[in-house]
Structures are given as C-alpha cells and as structure tokens.
Image (spheres, grey):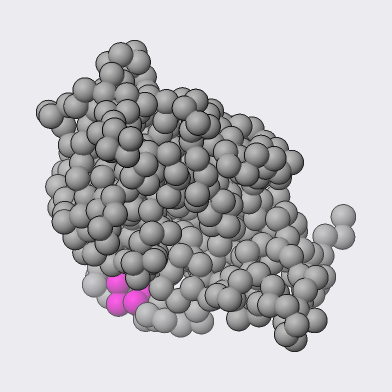
Amino acid sequence: MATSTEAKVAEKEPLFGKKEKALLTDPLLDNNPITIQVLGVCSALAVTSLIYPSLVMAVAVVFVCAFSSLATSILRNTIPKAVRLIVQLVIIATLVTLVNEALKAINYPVYKQLSVYIGLIITNCIVMGRLEAFAMANKPWRSFLDGIGNGLGYGLILVVVGAVREIFGKGSLFAGSGIAMNIIGAGPQYWIDTATAGQWGNTFFGWYANNNLMVMSVAAMFVIAVLIWIQRSRNPKLVDIS
Amino acid sequence: MSTRYIYIFALVMTVVVALLLAGSKVVLEPIASKNEDIFNKRQILEAIATPLEEAGKAVASLSDQEVLDIFEKQVEQAVVTADGASVESIKAIDVDMAKERKKPEAERMYPVYEVSLDGKSFYIFSVRGSGLWDAIWGNIALEEDMNTVAGVSFDHAGETPGLGAEIKDNNAWKAQFVGKKIYDGDKYVSVYVRKGGAIDMEHEVDGLSGATVTADGVTKMLYDGLKAYEPYMEDAEGPTSMNLQ
C-alpha cells in the first residue's frame, strides 16, 4: 500500500514541472524577496557598492538558502516543534560558517571586503523566512528549488544595485575581479578618459565626475526604492489599492 | 515529542555540526592562513609601489608567488623596541600591531622591513591608529636617508566608503606622500594631512574632503607611529651621515 501511494505522489510531482519552474522564477520578479517582500535589505544596502562583492554575496546566499532549505526539509518531520527555530538557526549558521571558511581559502581579498556581511547572512530574514514558511511544510526537492529561487531573486537585485552604484560612483565595473573594467574617469586606464586635454574625451566628458553619494549605503536605498517603484507601476497585481 | 526526544535531537545535532565545522576548519585553515600571509605582505609592498613600478613591477599585478618571492629574497625583517634595541625572538611579519598598541609603550615591539631594490634600500615601518569609526593602520616606506617618504599604504577596519575609506582606495591621494620629508632640518615633524590643502609642500599633504576625522587620525597615526621608530632610524642612518661629514 505504502509503495502505491508513494508512486501516486511521485506521478503528481514531476521533477521539473510548472510548479517547480514557478518556484525558481517567481522570486526573481513577482515575488522578489527584496523589492516585494522587502526582506534582506540590510545586507543589500551594505555590500552593493561594487558589483564583484555583490556577486560573491549573491552566490553565498544562494548556496546557504538552497542547502539550508534542503536540510530543513529533509529533517522537517524529525525536528521537535518546540525548538524548530533554534534548529533552523543552527543549520543556517553552520552553512554560513562553511561559506566563510571557504571564502577565506578561495579569495581572501573579497573575504576582507565582505568582512562581517558573510557572517550576517545568518540573520538574513530571507533565509530563515523561507525555512519557516516553505521548507518546514514541503518536500526536499521543492524546498531546494525554492531556496535557489529566493537566493537568485535576492542576488539579482544585489547585482543590479551594485552595477548602478559602481558605474556612477566609481566609473568602473567588476573592480577587484579578474575582468575589471574601467569605464569612465580621469586617467589613461579608463576607456573614456575625462582628463586628456584637447581630445574628444575632454570635450564631451570633461564635466564628468563620479557621484560620491553612490558609494555610500544611502544610495542603495534610493536605487532599491526606484526599482520597487518601477516594478510596482508596471505590474497591476502589485498595486496597493487600500 | 517528549522532552527526552528534544534533548537527544539537540545533542545529536550539536555533535554532527561540531564535527562538520571542525573538519572544514582543519582542511581549510592552512590555505586561509597562507592567503592571509600573502594579503599582509602585499599590503606592506604597496608602501613601495612607486619604486617597485619604476623597477617594472606593479604591485596590483604581482602574482601571489611573486609577492612571496620578493619577501623571501629582497626583504630583511627586523623587530625593534621603542629604544631602538632589536628583538630576535619574533619575525616582523608576525608582530600583531593591534596587540602591541594595547601594551605599555616601553614593552611594544615594532616591525621594520628593509627592502633592497635595484641597489637602493627602502625601510618600511608599520603604524596603527584610530580613524572615525574604528582602527586604521598603514605602512610607510622611507628612503635610505630615513627622511624622504617613498610611499604609503593604508587600510582601515570600518571607515565610510567614498569618504574615510579613501585613505585606502584613493591612489592619487596616497601618491602625494611620495617625496615628503619627515624631518624639518633636525626636527621631527612627520607628515601632516592638512584640511583645505597642503601649505608647506615639504611636510604636508592635502586633506580628504568629507573625511576630516579620518585624515586627522592619519596625521596622528603617522606622527606617533614614526616617532616610535626614531631611535632605530638614528642608529640606522648614524654611520651614513657620519660618512657624509
């Protein structure tokens, strides 16, 4: 008997059907953890002054989100209800510590740059929110996808905000990584050199200066707010009519 | 779910997690500490970025192995006390400036790195102080005359990005230090970061707009930090200046 019910359930849940796809894509836009649920904003403000650290942070959160969801979902029937939040926290903290140690070994300069923020993934509301809301009530595979989806949704916003802030704040892209690009600024290392006198660069871009506000965390607040604004005005489902 | 079950669950969970973390630490720690070592050495070499570049080596594009090689072959490490006496028991790179700063002044140890580059010697001194939010630290390279600054590198624990953090990120600002003198005749004056722009071009550099407190912190750090090396400097340059006379 047990096997036949399991077979039925397996039939109902294909490995990668519509629902599974929705778990991955929904958090990217329509249910984005940052712009719609407004979770995880703290780290989104702090680490997005450059793209590269944002990208590293995004990868770390995808990893932690996916595997903590998986682990919680596997254990969901054995976790005592009375201590479930503590158990979730232990799972997250373990994974974050692993990420922290791995990053130290793989890319030390980025580890230095992200400093406390990797550790703060532990308190990122997105991760624990998904564990409590989804992984505690769903099967491992779906929870895993949900974790990846939410991590990606968070990472997407992080990279977009990082790109805007870096290009207007520093005139570069991917600074600190192997493919650093210097777009605009004063100096021969930039593609558009605003300092070269007499050349077209000076004529058209001599006025250009980096916006120092963009380097500060407050700029992330503005950029995220604008993203929320755009998203809400384009999607009637999200318009708050109350 | 009995209380007993909860206890057992917690116990098993703790043991599993502890083993996992301990295992990862054992595997990754050696790689991480090697990375940290390279990171610190690179920061020290950044103080002589200008002479290194003249020798055809840009610090930013040095590979990890090259950094270690330079340290192996071209750098003499020394540790001195505030009296200028040398300490043999510890290597300069292992001196933890944060810990030294908490000790009473007489017990502090100060690292010195003597770099030979194309027949010239540079002396790199480590300093540490306070910025606006947290600690700041740096390395100052002096030329053989123990007076002319050959370059600086700074780092910080938590200065504001774009403002105070410019002491680390702004290469144009750091480049101003090159060629400044820390002595005015025989008088020790260090290098002063002047808000509103340097007046005395020999001993001052421009301040950083929006980062007055951090810049003042740099001034104080340089003054106090280099002063501690004075006995060492006198010893080191003593014979040379005698020869000149």
List x then y, in percent, for residue B123: 32, 43
Q: Given the current orientation, which residue lies at the most extreme right position?
A: A242
List x then y, in percent, for residue B79: 22, 32
In this rendering, would B244 be left or right of A3? right
Overall secondary structure of the magenta stretch? helix
In this rendering, would A146 be left or right of B232? right
Q: Quadrant of residue B53?
A: bottom left
- Nearer to me, B46 or A30: B46
Residue drawn at (33%, 35%), measured in percent from left and top?
Answer: B245
Residue B188 among those drawn in magenta: no
- Nearer to me, A224 or B148: B148
List x then y, in percent, for residue B126: 36, 37
In this rendering, would A218 be left or right of A132? right
Residue drawn at (58%, 76%), measured in percent from left and top?
Answer: A188
Residue drawn at (56%, 51%), measured in percent from left and top?
Answer: B176
- Nearer to me, A17 or B242: B242
Start and end of the magenta stretch?
A6-10
Please state, as top left, top right, bottom left or bottom right, where the N terminus of chain B lies in the image.
top left
From what the image shows, is residue B171 above or below residue B7? below
- Nearer to me, A31 or A55: A55
Residue drawn at (34%, 13%), measured in percent from left and top?
Answer: B104
Q: In the rendered image, is residue A77 in sight?
A: no
Q: Quadrant of residue B38?
A: bottom left
Residue A8 among those drawn in magenta: yes
